Amino acid sequence: MQSGFSFLKKAPFTRLLLPLIAGIITQWQLQFTLNLWVLVFSISLILLLVLFLLAPFEKFRYSSVYGFFIAIIFFSLGAALAWNKDIRHNKYWLGNLYKETSALLVTLEEPLSEKTKSYKAIASVQAMTGNHEIFPVKGNIIIYFQKDSSLPPLNYGSRLIFIKPLQTIKNSGNPAGFNYKRYCLFQDISHQVYLRPGDFELLPGKTGSWFKNFLFSTRENVLKILRKNIQGEKEQGLAEALLIGYKDDLDKNLIQSYSNTGVVHIIAISGLHLGLIYWLLIQILKPLQKRKTSRWLRPVLIISSLWLFSLLAGGQPSVLRSAVMFTCIVLGENLTHRISIFNTLAFSAFLLLCYNPYWLWDAGFQLSYAAVLSIVIFMKPVYNWFYFKRKLPDYIWKLNAITIAAQFLTLPFSLYHFHQFPNFFLFSNFIAVPLSSGILLGEILLVAVSLVPAVAVFLGKILSGMIWLLNTIIEEIDSYPFAVWNGIQVSIIQVILLFVIIAGLSSWLMEKQNAGLKTSLIAMFLFISLRSYSFYQANRQKKIIFYNIPQHQAIDFIDGRNYFFKTDSSLLKDDFLQSFHIKPSRILYRLKPAEHSASFFISENYGQFGNSKFIIIDSNFNFKKPAEPVHVNALILAFNPKIYLKQLTRIIQPDIIVFDASNPSWKIKYWIKDCNSLGIPYHNVSEKGAYEMNIK
């Protein structure tokens, strides 16, 4: 067995990859200048050349220094790549030059995707007007088009010109909320705009790459084939996601069921899909291997087909990683060289991060590499747990061994990103992986025979039944009690400690290294200590959180690990909005719902929490003038109440005024002017994000 703990020596690209990753992270976190990294790179390279000119004996003597300078070179290279990829450092970046009065010339970089109330597309900004001149700019924006019958036909390559103020993309500011601003910035997107049919002019002609146009048109044709032959909305949505990674039609509840049961990976195009297509191509192209004259054609066709499928699937990090890896495998096989899988993985990751350093933060990228590496290291030891003489039980156990092995290194990432663990992952994967594999191969066959309607319809019915069966089984498993362990909160440090525990225990069990056991026990002690301290802090917390959910009121009153929720009726019925905006905060603070608390009291619009008093004034508030001014710690304005702050603050004296996200922005502007003139502190939830008020 090839040891998973000696791969640093057997995979030279791993030694280059690790400092590259460290450099990327350092640059993003600290934001140094490019000149610094050029200087560090140059000095390290010169010193490395000096060492290279030494006598052989001296080289051996300074081998550790030699390795240190190589690491510094690739560290600075990673940092420089991260600096260069950051669109904000481009002097022509949209954010540096944009003014609200500027006219923008943009090109749509993708077909429109339909949303509930609008159409959405990413557009690149080509030029801008300013100071009576037109100049080029760089950057992407998100455009939302109003759904309207008068909307002109828009597609990839369409050019638009408009004068409409752009909105800067920002985060909601809710605790532990999704970092949408960073996610967009990694795609060179920094602004967004909402356009009605009369807000823009569609210019004649189109621009864009013929290859991209071919990919988009091919994807559209594949979608038409699937929608024509696959019956049922849920079935169509899953079929589209499985084959080409199109997820706009996926049912949200169905996605949650796949996530809860630990099989959401079959929806994301990844190594599983590329592996199946690779196997299929190997079988089809076997005859070419027998003839010397056509042998060269086989790897060319395999690699071309894999990359074409990867691009059709949207070029996601997970599928690109798999495409690069399988390309290395195919080339290695045909060059008759033995290739280390560790080196192949490191090489593919190195190439991908050189192309886009920010893929390092992509959860799919992390999980994809962790899964493959975990399978390579742990599959054989797990498989050796049981021995079966017959082929069928042995094959079944092999599938389960792969599933179990993949969990070792993906577990810390899964806990960190998704805060849950699917307890029935083994059972659900045992059913979902082979069934989804058959569906994927069937979909490829469906596209191939789509020109024969009778065959396509017949095959479509079979696939519809298979997808229905898969969805039904997954939803049934998800409905079982304790199907998922939810609400798990781990920090970055705890994730690192989990990896140390796994590595230490594995080296002890697989390599008989006692040092591994000691290391894992120390890491386990630190992990438990950090967890215990975080629970101790959670039990002592007492605060109010005013969340930022557009057009809604959402307030959590937190007493220890209990929370009391105040919201409007529409948000109370919307589980999706609550899960997206509020659930991450409750996981972060380790909260559970409660009905009452001795330190919390609220009646209509008046409330007291500990020693803190507050008043919530909304559109239904019936104000009764008190005999004398009332002091409160917080005054909350919600749902556009008809009040004048100058009059109100004569009888209510707040320490701070909180403008709820349910208020219109134009009204908040007037209130802010009043607060500034009166010298009263305020917090605009819509602009600054959630407001956390600690209670004494």
Image (cartoon, rainbow, N blue to C red):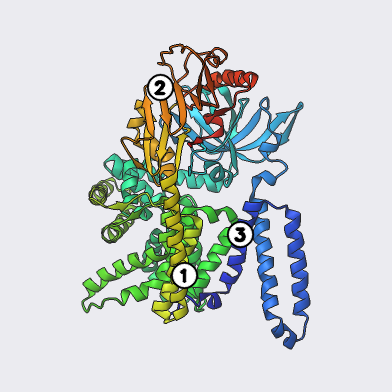
Helix, strand or loop under label 2: loop
Report whether 461 appears left or right of 130.
left
Work out whether 160 lies above or below 433: above
Tell me, for residue 674, which label it has, or none. Answer: none
Residue 605, label in figure:
2
Neighbour tally class for label 3: few under 14, some 14-19, many 20 plus, Cα within 10 Å: many
The quadrant in which residue 549 appears is top left
Distance of label 1 from label 2 (alpha carbons): 52 Å
Sequence-first disc among 3 and 1: 3
Quadrant assignment, res 520: bottom left
Three-letter amino acid code of the residue under disc 2: Asn
Name the spot of residue 336 as percent of width and height, x first.
50, 79
Picture layout, residue 414 above or below residue 460: below
Q: Label for residue 354?
A: 3
Cα gap from disc 3 to disc 1, whole angstroms: 36 Å
Task: Give the amino acid type for the residue marked by disc 1 in the picture.
Answer: Ile
Please tell me whether mark 1 sits on a helix, a strand or a loop.
Answer: helix
Q: Nearer the viewer, mark 3 or mark 1?
A: 1
Identify residue type, mark 3.
Cys
Query: For numbered disc 3, what is the local secondary structure?
Result: helix
Determine crowd level at label 2: few under 14, some 14-19, many 20+ residues with C-alpha closer than 10 A: some
Identify the residue at image location x=78%, y=76%: 50
Q: Residue at x 46, y 13 (%)?
A: 626
Q: Is residue 370 above or below residue 490?
A: below
- Which comes before the other along the chain, label 1 or label 2? 1
**Inter-mark Cα distance, 2 to 3:** 56 Å
Query: Which residue is tagged 1?
Result: 522
Place of residue 100 in the rendered image (x, y in percent of width and height, measured from the top left): 66, 26
Q: Are marks 3 and 1 in contact (CB under 8 Å)?
A: no
> Of label 2 and label 3, which has the lower sequence position?
3
- Quadrant placement of the N terminus: bottom left
Residue 581, position as x, y percentages in the image: 43, 38
